[in-house]
Structure formats: structure tokens, C-alpha cells
Image (cartoon, rainbow, N blue to C red):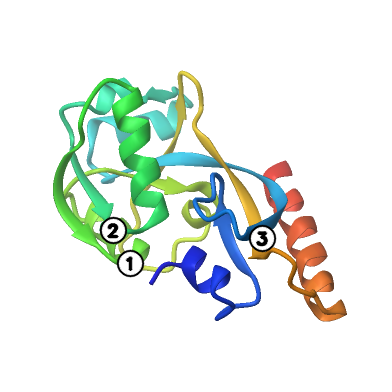
Amino acid sequence: MNLEKLTASGQTDLSLLSLPLEIPALAYEELGEERIDLAVPPEHPLAKRSLDGTKTSLEELKDEPFIVLKEGQGFRKMTMDLCRNAGFEPKIVFESNNMETVQSLVATGMGVTLVPHFIARAPRSEFVPVYLPLTNPAPSRTLVVAYRRGRYLSKAAKAFVETFKSTVSELTEE
């Protein structure tokens, strides 16, 4: 079951999600915008762009093998939509339930992927891909804290939301 359904059914009090939300029973507070980055293997020809600051467009990735999250995960849908809007269907060579696994497989040379910037800036594996900003235009997503509409939010929950907002604000200013 995905986070939206868990939150709508009351099994979680709050969830960090991105717009658009599919379930109307959810209310949310916007946290901010998060850039979407490209992850490539260190030996990939595009990796050199991390040194000179040249941006990459999604259209340039039409012939690349992609490693993506499995069906049912929101970021997979976003990846598919971004590629389709750029005029191509990604050539998926591997799927995983875990973003760290996806990043590690990219780092070993299996393919490329799209990664939320906050995840790209904090790799936790010994296998680290090269992260590049995208352009034409730079893709992003709107992060929200969602909760069941009409649900009472405790003082602790409200404080958590405010802390999250300030953290996202600080991260987007870097």
C-alpha cells in the first residue's frame, strides 16, 4: 500500500509526499520545491559536465538505459512523465523498490536515473553516481506534508510540520 492510501486510511498521521495527490480525502501543507537531478555513472560521457557546469536536457537521454523505481511508487511515475514529456519512452533495464539501490546500480555503470535533489545531495552508499542538474526547463516537484482531511493535528504534529518547512526552505536555499 502506498503512502497516500496509508495516510488517507488513518494508518499514518502525516506523510511526506509530492503533488499532485491522487486521493481527495487528503489535506496538505506545501513545504517547497525540490529540483530533480540526473544521476549518471562516473565514467559516463555526461559526467564531465559536473566539472564545467554544463546542463543536460532530458531529450539527450532518449537512448540511455534507465534504472527506475518499481510500479506504484510516485517518483517512478514522475520519471516516466518527465521522459514522455521530453518526447521519449525510457528504456528500462532494471527496477527496484529502493532509491539507494537504484543509485548504486547507476554508479556501477548499469544506466542512468532521475533522483530528487535532497537524496542526491546525501548519498549513503560506497557506490556514488555523478549528479547533474537538468534544464529545458529544470524539472522539480512540490513537496507537501499530507494528512487526512479533517484530522486533528496535535501541537507536536504542527511543530513537526513547521520544522519540516524550515528544513526544506534551508535546503532549497543552498
Q: Position of residue 98 (x, y in %)?
A: 33, 66
- Label 3 to label 1, Cα distance in Å? 21 Å
Q: Nearer the viewer, mark 3 or mark 1?
A: 3
Q: Is residue 84 left or right of residue 91?
A: right
Residue 151 vs residue 54: left or right? right
Q: Is residue 19 left or right of residue 39?
A: right
Examine the image and state in which quarter residue 152 appears: bottom right
Q: Name above or below for residue 61 compared with residue 17.
A: above
Which amino acid type corresponds to the residue marked 3 in the rendered image? Val
Position in image of residue 140 (x %, y %): 53, 37
Q: Residue at x 21, y 43 (%)?
A: 66
Q: Amino acid at mark 2?
A: Val
Disc 3 is placed on an element classified as: strand
Q: Residue at x 54, y 50 (%)?
A: 21
Q: Nearer the viewer, residue 150 or 66?
A: 150
Residue 12 visible in image:
yes
In the rendered image, residue 129, in percent from the top left (x then y), is placed at: 33, 51
Of the image marks 3 and 1, the number of the one nearer the N terminus: 1
Q: Secondary structure at mark 1?
A: loop
User: In whole angstroms, how far apart are the C-alphas of marks 3 and 2?
Assistant: 25 Å
Crowd band around label 1 with a 10 angstrom C-alpha radius: few (<14), some (14–19), many (20+)? few
Indicate the quadrant containing the N terminus: top left, top right, bottom left or bottom right.
bottom left
Give the label, 3 or 2, closer to the camera: 3
Residue 174, can we see it? no
Q: Which residue is mark 1?
A: 98
Label 2 sits on residue: 102
First in sequence, mark 3 or 2: give its number: 2
When asked about the image quadrant of residue 51, the answer is: top left
